[in-house]
Amino acid sequence: MGSLSSRLLRRRGGLSLGDGAAGEGGRGGGGGGRRGGKRKRGGGEGPGDSESDSDSEREERLHSAPRRKKLKSTSMYIYQTLFLNGENSDIKICALGEEWNLHKVYLRQSGYFSSMFSGSWKESCMDTIELEIPDQNIDIEALQVAFGSLYRDDVLIKPGRVVALLAAACMLQLDGLILQCGETMKETINAKTVCSYYNSAGTYGLDSVKKRCLEWLLNNLMTHQSVELFKELSINLMKQLISSSNLFVMQVEMDLYTALKKWMFLQLVPSWNGPLKQLLAQADAWFAERRRELEGDAAFLDMEQGAAFRPVFAHLRLQYIISDLASARIVERDALIPPEWLSSVYKQQWFAMLRVEQDNDTGPQEINKEELEGSSMRCGRKLAQDGDYCWRWTGFNFGFDLLITYTNRYIIFKRNTLNQPCSGSVSLQPRRSIAFRLRLASFDSSGKIICSRTTGYQILSLEKDQELCLEDPSGLQALGDAATEEQPSLGEVHQDVADDLPQEVGDAVDDVVEELDVQSQGRRAQSPRVPCTAGSSASQQAALPPMGCCPPSLGCPRAP
């Protein structure tokens, strides 16, 4: 601004000399006067004259063009003089032992005070008003910022203070400030703030913030675990998360059971403040002690202490826990789940196996979205580094040995029957159909989603040892550019089996979350080639889940 102003002043001076010389008929020693005379006589005789004309026109435009300048000191002057100093105050507001000398004309911007001053309230004629503050979230600092916002056009909102400020803004009915608090909350959601933001958004009616917090938890519950987060998650909120079809389960359903066990322990023993790596062992020891005290066969969820948690554990998909021997033994040992829950699941899976072996069910022929969302096997895989990977999920899968390969930005699903060794039996039925949904999502280090894509629900018909391409991989194709921007990467593929045999497979690549829902019966999936354009980063670290990854010794193609 300084150099621009200087240039304008110099040009103004030159123009005055030229005009003066021209007014004197071209007399005078200045070059501007001589050029002025030449223009009058000849109308320009060289390049210098045209340049002079151009300069003159430019200067004329500069002088005549209107300019709008913001007086930056005005708002600050009002804030300092009227709010901080309280000059010419016509009303005093008292609250929480503090006093503010304010002005009715500014307070009327608040819906709270506007109604007070314009109605027949006795306060409309008072020069001192005592405010009762029923909300414990409101403190003096929040009121200071809220009142001050009436005297200035910008407000500095600190994430650590946004809940208190939101409470004050809601009490005073400051719609603009409420909106700004909501935007600040959306931008600063992370593992430390998500629960407090979620609760505050519900209290003060910010539905968009509440929705954003719920989405963050669905995406990051399994990957951003912490002692503090588990303590803050209420029973109702955890129930909502576990029951959602959009929850990213890393890595299998058994891991979700383990997370719930740690969470339930911290809900019952909130005073525990040890490190996260010791939490599971401490939880196991605590529940074991409860079993010894009871000396009975009652499950913990049937006891008075555990009854409140039954609605949460009821949404576990137990059929994908008992299909693995090691997991089934842990569940039996823990004795958290009521025996009747497990008995019904065992019976269901036994009949499912008979249907697979004897009923020649070829799998789903149409999409059953409700069944996919409610009973699919939730599995996830995190690949934080580009490379070649091949894995399978262990456990009894009704002869459906599904190999997952990531290579050259392709995700391949293969129904293995004869090509690679398998620890269990495989189905030799000639063709099986699977219904699935594949999701990819990219996250930054705080868990904020960058972008996401989904294939929607689709059906593939697979022969033995077959690899098939998805019909519409365009949803995944669009992820490439965005995924290179950030570091962490999650992937989840969900596979669901028809007739009570859901199974899902998960995969994530380079800042990407994937989800696939697959429905099949007595199935064997071969690898559809799915172009996966997720970006890679040299700084990323691979996080490979202990899910029976297929080692090179098994002859798995492209195995790392």
Image (cartoon, rainbow, N blue to C red):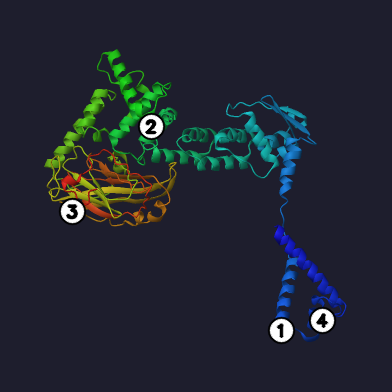
Residue name at image x 39 percent, y 21 percent: 268
What residue would you read off at disc 1? 46
Residue 473 in the image: state x and y as whole percent: 31, 56
Residue 119 in the image: state x and y as whole percent: 72, 34
What residue would you read off at disc 3? 466
Q: The disc labelled 1 sits on which kind of residue?
A: Gly
SS at badge 1: loop
Residue name at image x 74 percent, y 64 percent: 8
Q: The disc labelled 4 sits on which kind of residue?
A: Gly
Q: How many marks can you see?
A: 4
From the viewer's perspective, is the residue at label 3 or at label 4 nearer? 4
- What separation in Å lies between label 3 and label 4 (alpha carbons)? 92 Å
What residue would you read off at disc 2? 239
Q: Which mark is residue 37?
A: 4
Q: Is residue 22 above or below residue 337?
A: below
- Residue 248's quadrant in the figure? top left
From the viewer's perspective, is the residue at label 4 or at label 2 nearer? 4
- What separation in Å lies between label 1 and label 4 (alpha carbons)? 14 Å
Going from N to C along the chain, the mark reached first, 1 or 4, is 4
Dot 4 crowding, Cα within 10 Å, few <14, some 14–19, many 20+: many
- The quadrant of the rendering that contains the N terminus is bottom right
Dot 3 crowding, Cα within 10 Å, few <14, some 14–19, many 20+: some
Front position in the image: 431 or 406: 406
